[in-house]
Amino acid sequence: MDYLEVANSFATVIGLLSSWVSHRREGKNDYEEFFNWLKDHNIELSNQILSNSKITEEIKIILIQDRDLILKKFVELDKRMATLSCSFSFTRGLAKAIRPGAELSDQAIYILEKLVDSGGSWILEIPYKDGVELMIYDGDGDIEIKERRFLVDDLRNLVESELLLHDLNSAGQNKYTLTRTGYNYIKDYRSM
């Protein structure tokens, strides 16, 4: 199976799992029932799954979870995929049409770009009487906050998209750490 087939299969399996779980009102999410349903919808994909014990096992692990939890996780995955899809010009329009607001703001992208360009790995939020400043702790460069009233929202979106990780330092200050996904987001964003 080539790269495109793998990517298509993952998205397809997630979509089919989401569809199947969301349409089941009650009862447990039985793997055998799902697989029979899958055969009716995509025989080729069901054969690929059947021939791969690891995929089969992972689907079983998902399906033993509580239905509401599964649906909540799929909603989170959908939001993240839409946000990440906005970094590619060929999927940006579709992602924004399906999930308005999925695209990161210019300020959020700027913050992420400054951290990537600095060579650093994390940002410290330093409180001042007029608000906060963002300091790249272990890299070069400064982050100029252009839209202070939206800073909290931008940082929250970066964390929820798993482009940054949030933690507190020993003094209780907010610390935002660059993730590999965040680094790759900027790389992909710039290559458009």
Image (cartoon, helix red, strand yellow):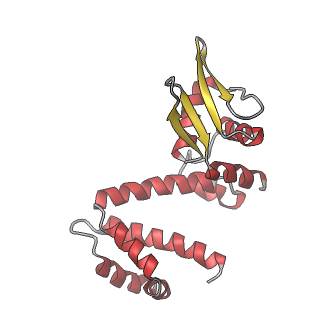
Vertical comparison of 85 with 169: above or below: below
Closer-to-camera residue (37/188) = 188
Closer-to-camera residue (51/153) = 51
Q: Position of residue 125 (x, y in %)?
A: 59, 26
What residue occupies the far front of the structure in this picture?
Answer: 170
Q: Position of residue 41 (x, y in %)?
A: 42, 82
- The image quadrant of residue 38 is bottom left
- The image quadrant of residue 92 is bottom right
Left or right placement of residue 41 versus residue 25 in this view: right
Q: Is residue 55 visible?
A: yes
Left or right placement of residue 158 versus residue 121 in this view: left
Left or right placement of residue 108 versus residue 70 in this view: right
Vertical comparison of 52 with 130: above or below: below
Total label count? Answer: 0
Q: Who's the residue at 65% across and 27% down the image? A: 134
Q: Position of residue 160 (x, y in %)?
A: 51, 44
What residue occupies the far top of the structure in this picture?
Answer: 129
Q: Quadrant of the N terminus?
A: bottom right
Q: Who's the residue at 30% across and 63% down the image? A: 65
Closer-to-camera residue (18/135) = 135
Left or right placement of residue 178 versus residue 14 in this view: right
- The image quadrant of residue 33 is bottom left
Q: Position of residue 132 (x, y in %)?
A: 60, 20
Q: Is residue 96 visible?
A: no
Q: Quadrant of the C terminus?
A: bottom right
Q: Who's the residue at 58% across and 51% down the image? A: 83
Q: Who's the residue at 56% across and 55% down the image? A: 82
